[in-house]
Structures are given as C-alpha cells and as structure tokens.
C-alpha cells in the first residue's frame, strides 16, 4: 500500500497556535463593562438635557418678565401722555381748581366736571387702609397691594364717536361754540344711542355744524395682590389665588356703562407687576408756569398742585410668575423718590422698569 501525503487528505488539517483560543461570544464581564459605560453615557446625556431644559425655562421666565414690564410701561405711558386731552377745549387753566381733592370714584356729571383741572391725580403708597374715596369704587384694601401707588388719569378719547353709536349711560365730552359764540364744553351722559342735540348743543367754527362727541375716560391704575381670586372677587390673604401662587397684577378701574348707568369696572392688565411708584413733576404755578417741571415729589404739597403736574417718573418692579429653583432674591431695588425696597428673600427674579413721561396736553398749553 502506498502512503498518502497530508495534502491529499479530504479535509485540510486545522492548526492552532498554542496560546490562542477560538472566541465564540462575549463574556459576562464584557457585558457588565458595556452596560456600565452605557449607563454613564446615559446619565451624562440626561444631565445635559436637564440643564438645557432648566436654562430654557429660565430664559422663558425672563422673557415673559421683560415683556410684561415693557408692556405695562407702554400702557401707562400712552394714557399719561393723553391725560388732560379734551378735544378742542384748551382753556383748562381757566377752569376753577377744586379746593378739595376730587373723589375719583364719583360718576355724577358735576363731580366729573369739577375734577377736569386734575388730569393727573395720585395717591402715594396707601397701606392697609385705603383713602375713604375708594369706598365708592369696586376696590377694597384686600385687592390693593399695600405700599403701592394709585394713579388717576382723566381724558377724552382722541377718536370721535359716530352719531347714533353712543352707549347709553356712558359720559361723552363735546367741545365747541355756544349759541353766543363762546368756546366751551359739555360733559354729559348719553340717554340714547342718538345724539341729544338739546344736551350736546355746541357747534364748530361755522356756527352750524354740530361739534363732535368723544368718550370721556377716568382710568384708575393700581397693583392688586392677585390676578384671579380663588373665590369671589377678593384676593386671599393666604395667597391661594392664581392656581396656588398669587401673582401681583397691574389692574385698572375704567369709567364705563353697565345696564344704562355709569359704573367703574375692573380690568386686569399685566401679570407680574409687583410695585408701582410714581414721582410727579410739578410746574411752579399755572399763571407763571412754562409747562416744565420745577420739582418732583411723590405727592402734592397742596390740593391745587395736582393741576400743575407736567411730567411723571414711573417706576415699576416686575417679577417672574414662577420661582426659580435654587435662587434667592436678596437684592435692593431703587424706585425713585420712594427710595430703595429690599426683596423678600424669595425665589422670584425681579427687574425695575423706569420711564420719564411728559403729560403732553397740560404742559403744551403752558409752553405756547
């Protein structure tokens, strides 16, 4: 028989090096190491996402705070600039100045007319007890944030009210010529949607065409401890309003008409406005004034001085509606002549918005 060489075998022989073993899969140790590395990566990724989410939430809070502060400033600025606008009537300094501070909540024609010289009127930081005048308004001490100013703005609308579109019970101002060709005004309540020519009887310069009518406004701005009371219409002392965290809110009482009668209604304007402090710029005197403020104060020295307000320095303190985790506000905020106010060491971030606003109509009449 012949011997066969190894190359002629039907299957090749497998040769292994002495130190090598065939690897058929992963060991338990390798699986554990892989899982541990994956968990570490997952934890790092989760922490990164959480930080990004937290940063984004803080940016959104700050953006809302800035937007609210600017919007509140703009609302007040526009109304203050229009204060004292009475259509074509320009003899405001000729009207008798009241000897007593007008009650801004009274809605009689005589009361509204006597208060016309005071286009701006303020109450400096009332405390737990509001001035007696506000008993005639839908505003009580619980709905006013202690230590914040109250601002009253009186004016007519720049827009003319169309004939036949009057709201019954609403007050309108008409300025023009009397039958004896004297320039005057009429401030009266509408009894019908159509213009009552027996009441609103003033004419334009031609002596024939009826003078236009404008809605008369009295706006009272204040800071409330909450936006939406938990029950009824009164903010809770326990701060359970607005879903559990009471949000200080800029609100306004507006002279309006309800069921054919004049009435003040409350409107929420801007959330997160925690403080309103106002410095008033007073011209020295109506007779010799030039329409520029000679001094600033948080209140009038005498009742008659309210007729001499030519400018307003507005200071608003806005805060976030939600707390920031891990943040404590220990800052002090400068609010003009009212001085500095310290934050209550809570978790809300705050920002001051200040604006110098000219009361255009009274000041323009004096600088001519």
Image (cartoon, rainbow, N blue to C red):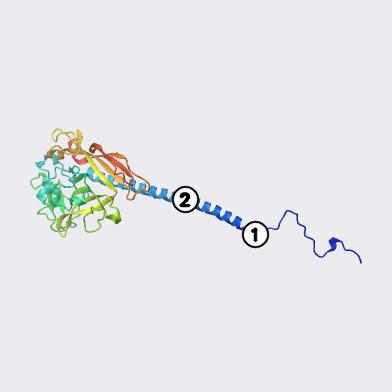
358 and 279: which one is in front? Answer: 279
Where does the image place residue 210, in percent across and percent down from the top left? 14, 51
For residue 15, side relative to residue 350 (left or right):
right
Residue ranking furthest to the bottom: 1
Looking at the image, do the residues carrying marks 2 and 1 touch, with CB atoms under 8 Å apart? no
Name of the residue lying farthest toward the left: 180
Q: Residues within 10 Å of mark 1 (few under 14, many from 20)?
A: few
* 174 w.r.t. 193: above or below: above
Res 68 seen here: yes
User: Which of 214/342 is in front?
Assistant: 342
Query: What mark, if any, has residue 151 been given in the picture?
Result: none
Residue 103 location (% of width, % of height)? 12, 47
What residue is drawn where x is 29% and y is 55%? 244
The percent position of residue 25, horizontal first and vertical second, equals 65, 59
The residue beneath circle 2 is 47
Query: Image quadrant of residue 5?
Result: bottom right
Q: Residue at x 38, y 48 (%)?
A: 58
Between 262 and 48, the one lying in front of the other is 48
| Front disc: 2 or 1 | 1
Where is residue 84, by image quadrant? top left
Residue placed under numbered mark 1 in the picture: 25
Residue 153 spot, x, y in % from top left: 19, 46
Q: Within 10 angstroms of label 2, few (less than 14), some, or many (20 or more) residues?
A: few
Quadrant of the image for the N terminus? bottom right
- The residues tagged by marks 2 and 1 sit, at their Cα atoms, a distance apart of 34 Å
Instruction: Examine the rendered structure and indicate whether residue 10 appears above or below residue 332.
Output: below
> Which secondary structure lies at badge 1?
loop
Local SS, label 2: helix
Relative to 24, 116 lies left or right:
left
224 vs 154, nearest the viewer: 224
């Amino acid at each position: 028989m012949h011997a066969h060489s190894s190359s002629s075998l039907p299957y090749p022989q497998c040769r292994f090096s002495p130190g090598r073993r065939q690897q058929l899969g992963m060991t338990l140790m390798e699986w554990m190491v892989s899982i541990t590395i994956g968990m570490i990566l997952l934890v790092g990724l989760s922490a990164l996402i959480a930080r990004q989410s937290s940063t984004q939430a803080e940016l959104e809070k700050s953006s809302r705070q800035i937007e609210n502060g600017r919007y509140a400033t703009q609302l007040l600025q526009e109304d203050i600039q229009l204060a004292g606008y009475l259509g074509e009537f320009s003899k405001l300094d000729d009207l008798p100045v009241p000897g007593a501070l007008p009650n801004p909540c009274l809605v009689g024609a005589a009361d509204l007319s006597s208060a016309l010289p005071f286009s701006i009127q303020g109450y400096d930081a009332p405390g737990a007890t509001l001035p007696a005048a506000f008993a005639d308004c839908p505003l009580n001490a619980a709905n006013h944030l202690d230590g914040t100013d109250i601002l009253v703005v009186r004016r007519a609308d720049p827009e003319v009210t169309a004939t036949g579109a009057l709201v019954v019970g609403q007050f309108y101002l008409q300025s023009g010529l009397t039958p004896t060709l004297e320039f005057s005004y009429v401030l009266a309540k509408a009894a019908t949607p159509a213009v009552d020519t027996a009441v609103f009887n003033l004419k334009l310069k031609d002596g024939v065409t009826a003078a236009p009518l404008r809605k008369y406004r009295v706006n009272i701005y204040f800071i409330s401890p909450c936006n939406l009371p938990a029950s009824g219409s009164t903010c809770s002392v326990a701060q359970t309003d607005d879903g559990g965290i009471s949000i200080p809110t800029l609100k306004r009482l507006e002279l309006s008409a309800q069921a054919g009668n004049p009435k003040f209604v409350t409107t929420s304007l801007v959330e997160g406005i925690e403080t309103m402090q106002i410095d008033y710029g007073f011209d020295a005197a109506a007779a010799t004034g030039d329409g520029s403020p000679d001094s600033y104060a948080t209140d009038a020295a005498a009742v008659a001085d309210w007729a001499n307000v030519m400018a307003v320095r507005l200071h608003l303190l806005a805060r976030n509606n939600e707390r920031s985790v891990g943040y404590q506000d220990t800052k002090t905020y400068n609010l003009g002549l009212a001085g500095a106010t310290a934050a209550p060491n809570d978790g809300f971030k705050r920002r001051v918005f200040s604006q110098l606003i000219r009361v255009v109509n009274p000041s323009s009449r004096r600088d001519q």
